[in-house]
Image: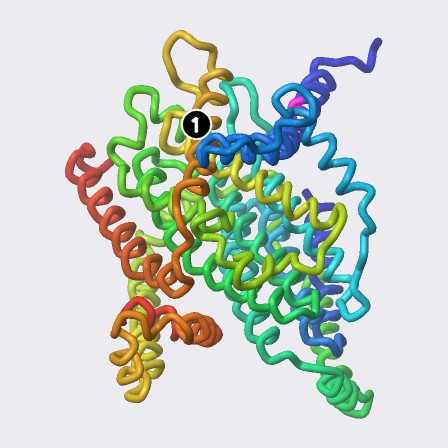
Amino acid sequence: MSWWTPQVAAIAFALFQAVVILLAAVGAAALLTMVERRLLGLWQDRHGPNRVGPFGVLQIVADMLKIVFKEDWIPPFADRGLFVLAPAIAMASLLLSFMVIPITPSWGVADLHIGLLFFFAMAGINVYAVLFAGWSSGNKYALLGAMRASAQTLSYEVFMGLSLMGVVAMAGSFNMREIVAAQETLWFIVPQFFGFCTFLVAGIAVTHRHPFDQPEAEQELADGYHIEYSGMKWGMFFVGEYVGIVLVSALMVTLFLGGWHGPWLPPIVWFLLKTAVFVGFFILLRAALPRPRYDAVMSFGWKVCLPLTLINLLVTGALILIFSPAGG
Amino acid sequence: MEIAFYLSAVVAVLATLGVITGTHPVHALLYLIVSLIAVALVFFALGAPFAGALEVIVYAGAIMVLFVFVVMMLNLGESTAQQERAWLRPRTWLGPAVLSSVLLLVLLTSLIGADVGGRIHGDTLTAKAVGTLLFGPYLVVVELAAMLLLAALVAASHLGRSEAHDEAGAVRHVPGTRTADGRGRAASERATGDAASSKESER
């Protein structure tokens, strides 16, 4: 075994980590399709899917069988290339973002020093999935949904970036590991409470989750941008949405709730627990809130959240300058 | 790193060729997005990941979305593709192509002949280094750019505002009368991009 040097072992372990994190992300997203319906059922005082397997856990298997064997139909009036490309972008850009999230002190795929910016870049690319899906479908409802989605995502990405700059200024780095390390004594949710609130809103809006799901409002747009999709292509949009939920939850845990830090329990358990709480919160929002009108969503973003993030950033900067040692 | 540099440079050149020769507007825009991402990878390969990430966020993630958005709203059909084909006759592009290939030859000889100094190595420039430079020696440039952007914002917000619109807006503030066309209005405002967004925040 002369080729099995420590270097090769390190590469193999890194690859193993990457594959495990990728599979865990996709698996969690697929599992969420069932968990969400069960939790919605619980909160809305009905049963939800409870027939297949114990507590309905095998519902995912049934759904996956259905999605995989459904006829994968491309409408003759669609733009074939873009129609196929869009679901791939939807899923790949979100899954790639998991790369920068540190799970535990020793687990995590990449330790980029521009980690947070990498997430913003991937979120920016993710807009194209919806845009191309809506346009290439050749359907006016799909196009309307795509237009809403792109306008909404662009507006909310503006202050999503700004809401995290307070965290970056306090940690002094874009690197996610350093941000987590800076929260050892005090979680950033305390000094950056407004940043946390606006990032929460922006995160929901960017993943098009209820109450910001105007792009796919069933009642008005009959499902919006993925109306013409069927089979596994639709499944990729569907699972992509849940990947987005897990991603935004994991980001909130990393940036505001101290990542893996916590007493008694091992780091991985803390990370998973905190992430699960946020995922549950996302689902609770869907169960509890009505859907606001589209123009109300836009004006809320520009008139409330954007000024709030700007003020938060200014105050954070001023306080850091006041309390930091001179010349630091 | 050198392999990454040359590969992404080749992709950038090919994608840009695709933008110019493509006759379908949305497909041409897709090529342009690929080209911008390739340029961002060139920055990564040169050891400037901060610039690369900003390239993707600003150009590919925001500006190109507005381009794609407007082109989609225009709903250009087969007639524009034919018009484009008519404009792309060799008679039209042959002259400029010959002249610019002479310029390319000059550039290549100067690049090969002279010692350019820089070599591609693994050093990376951190965001902190970029920030220190921007707010140190180049502070005046940053301030001037900020003022220019503010002026553009104010001008766009002024141009995007119309008397008729304000009156219509005043009528819509009566509860219950703004639901029906509120959505269409918001969507059409998006199409004008920054002008609309600044107006939205102002109103």
x and y percentages locating residue A159 in the rendered image? 37, 53
Q: Residue at x 46, y 74 (%)?
A: B184
In which image quadrant can residue B178 be found?
Answer: bottom left
x and y percentages locating residue A140 in the rendered image? 62, 71
Residue situated in front as seen by the camera: A315 or B106: A315
Q: Which residue is mark 1?
A: A277
Instruction: Specify whether A158 is left or right of A77.
Output: left
x and y percentages locating residue B1 in the rendered image? 68, 42
Q: Which residues are magenta?
A: A17-21
Q: Is residue B44 above or below residue A73?
A: above
Q: What is the count of numbered marks?
A: 1
x and y percentages locating residue B14 in the rendered image? 75, 64
Instruction: Specify whether A34 is left or right of A254.
Output: right
Residue situated in front as seen by the camera: A81 or B45: A81
Q: Is residue A35 above or below residue A310?
A: above
Q: Is residue B69 above or below residue A178?
A: below
- Label 1 element class: helix
Q: Residue at x 52, y 69 (%)?
A: B66
